[in-house]
């Protein structure tokens, strides 16, 4: 029995890496000179291909003397790098992965007296970029033990504590780190920032390794996520880590009955394809069996006809078609246009050598000994029936947006193109449809026309249902005082609206700061990730009032902890009235210097002695925290001065 060869569905470029590569190619296609800030991805072969097209690698912006456009790779960079490029006037394209950029926003939200703990590899460029966005103290750890080794009292000295993780870090290690963090730092804000694609890739690699004899892991020797994939697989089976197909050794696979292939996020599809084809040849040589004379004779008599459904095995893959063996004397082939409706798809991304396909016979040419087949048409027949059924059952379908057209988008599902009007494509009409192109989406079927084989769908209906589900869950669990991590959605003159995950709450401007502010933008901005707590809820009107300012920042608490009656302090006069002057003791708290306490002499009006903005020393004569009143006195200090002077001038007693 021939060995089984499986390629992981998640192998190869992740979204962030593909996006970075596409941005570089867009610049090159536009004829613009390009360089990358560090190797674009951790794959030597791909970087060499870019170099062949004139893409240079610079380690810092100052090396770009010709001011070519710099492409920032998906790992991201520190804030200082952006500042340096702006100062040098160098054009740049930011290919930072959106998942990494989210961590940058979290790091930037850490206050100067706060602390950010990054779980990851300290030498990895992604981690170095995250560190460069934080104003507070930063610690980089790579294991639960390193977190446990930090004294608890060290964390306690910080006003706030944030935990994030390198997007490509090993999932099980991060989960252990997060568990330790919750125990030693009960007030910490812990963000699970491992990329979902990374997590899925690692989970699939573990599943395949568990049931395979040999695991092949493809990726650059310096690729962190490739090394982690290999580490995950080794406990389950023999694991071979390679960069290219040339490193495959047939001796590693002797006796193996099941072999699986996976690849790191920076491994090009071309290299994965070469490894798969080379492995297929190795296994074919090891397991080749000659057909018996009787089998060959029976095969020579087999024929086929137009419209027949047949099973074919992929024997080779070309850029514009695939060759298949359908068990007859004919040479079967499937043109790319009959394989898929996606004009951007490549055959090697859809099928692999050795795959079995259900196909429809389109045209038989007995003279030339060929038969043209179609996967698309057979899929469309079954797919349209599924779409028809989904219209009745309201089943949610998965698809990919293949085109943005006038009035909406086209999504491909089960071989059928479904039209989704612009009004049904997004939650908000202001969202651009171009953002959906080539994205996986879910939608419901609103209507179908069997005669014209057309269907109309709605992404918005699914998003609305999902949001409703999140909303119902939220209202079932919400309670006053409960804390949430939310994202600032919009700002008004009277407050900030925060998305709590399916439900929006409002932080009134008075709840944003203990001090006086004129607009919420002085404290937060749209996109900020903030910690809030529920102050009040109105289930009937579905309104949520949120709090943001913290008790420890309350100026009255600060005053009570640091000031006492009889203490002499400097103050600034902020306003004058007929009965005295108000002076700022600390930001947010003013005390009254009564007109009778301004001077030892009689004062006609406070402005005769004091002016707004003037700095004076006063003595605290009363602190009434219940009524929040403070009395201050300049006169008390003036009355103490003669006594002090008299003591200084008094003669010393004779010995």
Image (cartoon, helix red, strand yellow):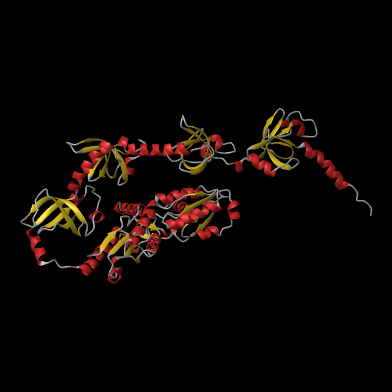
Specify the quadrant that holds the N terminus: bottom left
* Residue 347, quarter of picture: bottom left
Residue 111 in the image: above or below residue 227:
above
Confirm whether residue 440 shows in the render. Answer: yes
Q: Is residue 340 above or below residue 575?
A: below
Of the pair 259 and 279, the residue shown nearer to us: 259
Q: Is residue 422 left or right of residue 76?
A: left
246 up-or-down from 266: above or below: below
- Residue, x 67% and y 41% (percent of image)? 559
Residue 64 at x, y = what percent?
Answer: 41, 58
Q: Nearer the viewer, residue 549 or 408?
A: 549
Image quadrant of residue 625?
Answer: top right
Residue 355: image quadrant is bottom left
Q: Is residue 382 left or right of residue 306?
A: right
Task: Indicate whether 117 appears above or below 447.
Answer: below
- The location of residue 291, given as percent across then percent down, is 13, 66
């Amino acid at each position: 029995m021939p060995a089984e060869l499986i390629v992981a569905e998640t192998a190869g470029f992740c979204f962030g890496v593909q996006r970075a590569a596409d941005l570089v190619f867009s610049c090159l296609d536009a004829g613009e000179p390009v360089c990358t800030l560090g190797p674009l991805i951790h794959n030597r072969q791909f970087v060499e291909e870019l170099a062949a097209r004139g893409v240079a690698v610079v380690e810092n912006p100052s090396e770009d003397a010709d001011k070519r456009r710099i492409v920032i790779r998906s790992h991201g960079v520190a804030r200082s790098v952006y500042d340096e490029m702006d100062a040098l006037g160098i054009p740049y394209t930011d290919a930072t992965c959106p998942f990494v950029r989210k961590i940058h926003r979290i790091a930037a939200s850490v206050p100067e007296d706060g602390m950010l703990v990054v779980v990851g590899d300290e030498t990895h460029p992604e981690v170095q970029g995250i560190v460069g966005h934080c104003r507070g103290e930063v610690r980089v750890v790579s294991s639960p033990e390193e977190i446990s080794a930090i004294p608890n009292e060290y964390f306690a000295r910080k006003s706030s504590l944030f935990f994030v993780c390198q997007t490509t870090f090993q999932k099980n290690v991060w989960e252990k780190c997060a568990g330790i963090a919750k125990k030693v730092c009960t007030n910490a804000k812990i963000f699970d920032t491992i990329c979902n694609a990374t997590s899925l890739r690692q989970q699939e690699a573990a599943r395949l390794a568990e049931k395979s004899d040999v695991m092949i892991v493809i990726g650059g020797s310096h690729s962190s996520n490739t090394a982690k994939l290999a580490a995950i697989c080794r406990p389950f089976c023999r694991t071979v880590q390679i960069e290219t197909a040339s490193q495959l050794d047939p001796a590693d696979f002797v006796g193996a009955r099941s072999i699986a292939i996976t690849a790191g996020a920076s491994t090009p599809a071309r290299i994965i394809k070469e490894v798969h084809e080379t492995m297929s040849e190795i296994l074919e040589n090891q397991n080749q069996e000659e057909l018996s004379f009787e089998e060959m004779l029976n095969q020579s008599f087999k024929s086929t006809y137009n419209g027949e459904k047949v099973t074919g095995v992929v024997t080779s893959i070309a850029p514009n078609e695939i060759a298949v063996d359908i068990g007859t004397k004919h040479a079967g082939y499937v043109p790319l246009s009959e394989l898929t409706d996606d004009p951007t798809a490549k055959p090697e991304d859809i099928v692999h050598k050795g795959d079995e396909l259900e196909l429809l016979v389109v045209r038989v040419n007995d003279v030339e000994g060929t038969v043209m087949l179609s996967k698309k048409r057979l899929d469309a027949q079954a797919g349209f029936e599924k779409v028809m059924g989904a219209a009745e059952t309201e089943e949610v379908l998965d698809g990919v947006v293949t085109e943005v057209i006038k009035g909406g988008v086209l999504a491909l599902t089960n071989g059928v193109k479904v039209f989704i009007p612009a009004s049904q494509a997004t939650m908000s009409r202001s969202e651009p449809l171009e953002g959906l192109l080539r994205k996986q989406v879910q939608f419901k079927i609103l209507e179908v026309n069997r005669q014209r084989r057309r269907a109309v769908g709605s992404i918005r209906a699914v998003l609305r249902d999902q949001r409703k589900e999140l909303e119902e869950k939220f209202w079932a669990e919400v309670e006053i005082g409960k804390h949430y991590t939310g994202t600032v959605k919009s700002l008004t003159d009277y407050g900030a609206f925060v998305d709590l995950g399916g439900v929006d709450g409002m932080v009134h401007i008075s709840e944003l700061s203990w001090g006086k502010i004129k607009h919420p933008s002085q404290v937060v901005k749209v996109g900020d990730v903030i910690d809030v707590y529920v102050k009040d809820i109105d289930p009937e009107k579905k309104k949520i009032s949120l709090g943001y300012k913290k008790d420890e920042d309350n100026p009255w608490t600060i005053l009570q902890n640091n000031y006492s009656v009889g203490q002499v302090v400097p103050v600034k006069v902020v306003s004058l009235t007929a009965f005295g002057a108000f002076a700022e003791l600390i930001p947010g708290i003013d005390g009254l210097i009564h007109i009778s306490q301004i001077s030892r002499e009689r004062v006609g009006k406070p402005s005769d002695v004091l002016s707004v903005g003037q700095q004076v020393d006063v003595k605290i004569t009363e602190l009434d925290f219940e009524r929040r009143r403070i009395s201050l006195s300049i006169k008390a200090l003036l009355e103490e001065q003669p006594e002090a002077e008299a003591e200084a001038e008094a003669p010393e007693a004779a010995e």
